[in-house]
Image (tube, grey):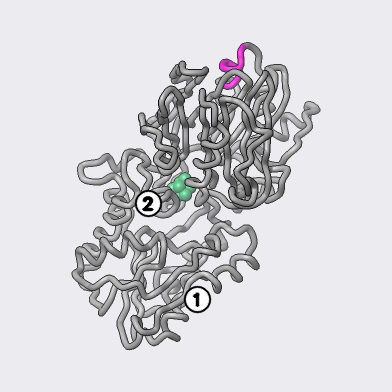
């Protein structure tokens, strides 16, 4: 997953972009970058690591100008190295162009192979560069070229282009990834989540619609709907379940409220399940555990403490690093757990390795019974739209029954929220439960996934 931000028409565009990236850091920790536009040129600084590592001081000299785009990344396609760090900057027939992309294209390999056969040379192994190549081949003004390029790609993109004179923001017709428009005095701001808009004190104007393209030049903004509208949007439900920050509002709902409702729905579905305490797997399980406790009346306790100095295990790129990080990350509180039957709440189970370790450590800390309750259904299939779920074979629920997963995890009972329960909780009271992507839970992919038609997803780059 990645996070993106754009600032237009502001004398401190780079500083604001940097601040915004801090508020999007949870969306990617492998690389960070900012590109600004000044005097007909683009100025870039990208590097590996956290925003604070790539931009360690207040000094943003070398990033002048009134327009900026920024990006934080973790790899879903392309290896984790500097060549793939974004924003990517290219010079082509349209002049210098930078791109920042959140999402994953599902026909990028197919297009890349076709272009390479015609002599195209790719600098990175990211799917985003495919868009730049398509852009370079399209005629007419940049706006038309961008439309032409994006009409050829399939899959998920919330993306930003920066040129010396404009910012273009676009969201794919299915709206997989969130993208918000904000305003700060006479500046337009575009960001993956409202957390970034709030931090820089920008007013949230609205969500950029699925299939919408915004052209921003100074104070002026123009909205286009140039793409064919699908029968239904496919907003990623996993953003609300796990990925987005709880203080953000995406897809029209505050994430914290959605997660609390997920916990409430789980408690209603598990009304027969009793225990002494409800314990969340922090941080993303906390809101659901609060909701579960509300409805069940079972006391909420922080029986696990998370170290905030270790990044999320789920998004580390190798198994070895994930294992190391998992052991560092969560510590049980024996005084809270000893002799207790525990309902352990997590937002999802992916590989199952972390949950298994947590169960083991709760037992070591003295928990008498562990009932694991998950605020989403079993993840049975990979994501091809930008969330780094692993190959099908590595997903613990892919071939195992619930009972087999329970035994693998070493818990006394295991429960998942139903698909309907999850969708109702995410949509909110009276909300529309259609219009979500649920493919990792149902295997029903809303778009063609031509790069991945082999039984297992191929790694690109
Ligand atoms: S497959 Fe799952 S994680 Fe990927 S976009 Fe769909 S709901 Fe989100």
Residue 170 visible? The answer is yes
Residue 319 horizontal side relative to residue 192, left or right: right
Picture residue at 65% right of the left edge, 68% below the top: 320
For marks 1 and 2, the one nearer the N-term is 2
In contact (CB < 8 Å): disc 1 and disc 2? no
| In the image, residue 145 lies in the stretch drawn in magenta | yes
Q: What element carries label 1?
A: helix
Residue 162 horizontal side relative to residue 212, left or right: right
Q: Mark 2 points at which residue?
A: 246
Picture residue at 45% right of the left edge, 41% below the top: 196
Q: Which residue lies furthest to the right in this view?
A: 119
Residue 208 horizontal side relative to residue 357, left or right: left
How many dots with numbers? 2
Classify 218 as above or below 348.
Answer: above
Q: Residue furthest top?
A: 140
Circle 2 residues within 10 Å: few <14, some 14–19, many ≥20: many
Q: Position of residue 447 (x, y in %)?
A: 49, 37
Picture residue at 42% right of the left edge, 44% below the top: 195
Classify 267 as above or below 76.
Answer: below
Q: Position of residue 130 (x, y in %)?
A: 66, 32
Q: What stretch is highlighted in magenta?
A: 141-146
Q: Name the residue under label 1.
A: 357
């Amino acid at each position: 997953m990645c996070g993106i931000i754009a600032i237009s028409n502001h004398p401190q565009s780079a500083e604001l972009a940097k601040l915004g990236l801090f508020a999007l850091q949870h969306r990617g920790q492998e690389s960070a970058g900012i590109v600004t536009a000044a005097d007909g040129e683009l100025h870039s600084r990208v590097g590996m690591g956290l925003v604070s590592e790539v931009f360690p001081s207040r000094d943003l000299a070398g990033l002048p100008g009134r327009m900026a785009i920024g990006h934080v990344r973790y790899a879903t396609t392309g290896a984790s190295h500097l060549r793939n760090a974004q924003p990517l900057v290219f010079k082509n027939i349209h002049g210098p162009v930078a791109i920042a992309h959140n999402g994953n294209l599902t026909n990028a390999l197919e297009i890349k192979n076709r272009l390479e056969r015609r002599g195209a040379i790719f600098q990175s192994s990211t799917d985003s560069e495919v868009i730049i190549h398509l852009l370079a081949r399209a005629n007419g003004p940049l706006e038309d070229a961008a439309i032409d390029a994006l009409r050829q790609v399939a899959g998920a993109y919330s993306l930003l282009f920066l040129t010396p004179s404009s910012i273009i923001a676009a969201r794919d017709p299915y709206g997989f990834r969130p993208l918000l428009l904000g305003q700060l005095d006479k500046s337009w701001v575009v960001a993956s989540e409202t957390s970034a808009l709030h931090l820089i004190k920008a007013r949230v104007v609205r969500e950029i619609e699925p299939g919408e393209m915004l052209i921003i030049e100074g104070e002026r903004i123009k909205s286009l709907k140039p793409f064919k509208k699908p029968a239904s949007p496919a907003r990623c439900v996993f953003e609300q379940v796990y990925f987005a920050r709880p203080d953000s509002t995406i897809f029209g709902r505050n994430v914290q409220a959605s997660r609390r409702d997920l916990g409430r729905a789980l408690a209603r579905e598990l009304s027969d399940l009793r225990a002494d305490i409800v314990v969340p797997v922090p941080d993303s399980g906390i809101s659901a555990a609060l909701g579960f406790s509300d409805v069940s009346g079972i006391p909420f306790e922080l029986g696990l403490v998370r170290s905030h100095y270790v990044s999320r295990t789920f998004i580390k790129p190798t198994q070895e690093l994930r294992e190391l990080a998992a052991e560092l990350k969560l510590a049980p509180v024996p005084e809270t757990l000893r002799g207790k039957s525990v309902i352990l709440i997590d937002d999802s189970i992916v590989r199952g390795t972390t949950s298994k370790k947590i169960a083991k450590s709760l037992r070591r800390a003295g928990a008498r019974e562990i009932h694991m309750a998950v605020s989403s259904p079993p993840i049975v299939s990979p994501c091809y739209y930008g969330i780094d779920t692993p190959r099908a074979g590595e997903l613990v629920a892919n071939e195992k029954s619930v009972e087999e997963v329970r035994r693998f995890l070493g818990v006394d009972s295991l429960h998942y929220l139903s698909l309907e329960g999850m969708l109702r909780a995410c949509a909110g009271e009276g909300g529309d439960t259609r219009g979500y992507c649920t493919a990792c839970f149902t295997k029903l992919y809303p778009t063609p996934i031509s790069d991945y038609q082999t039984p297992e997803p191929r790694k690109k780059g």
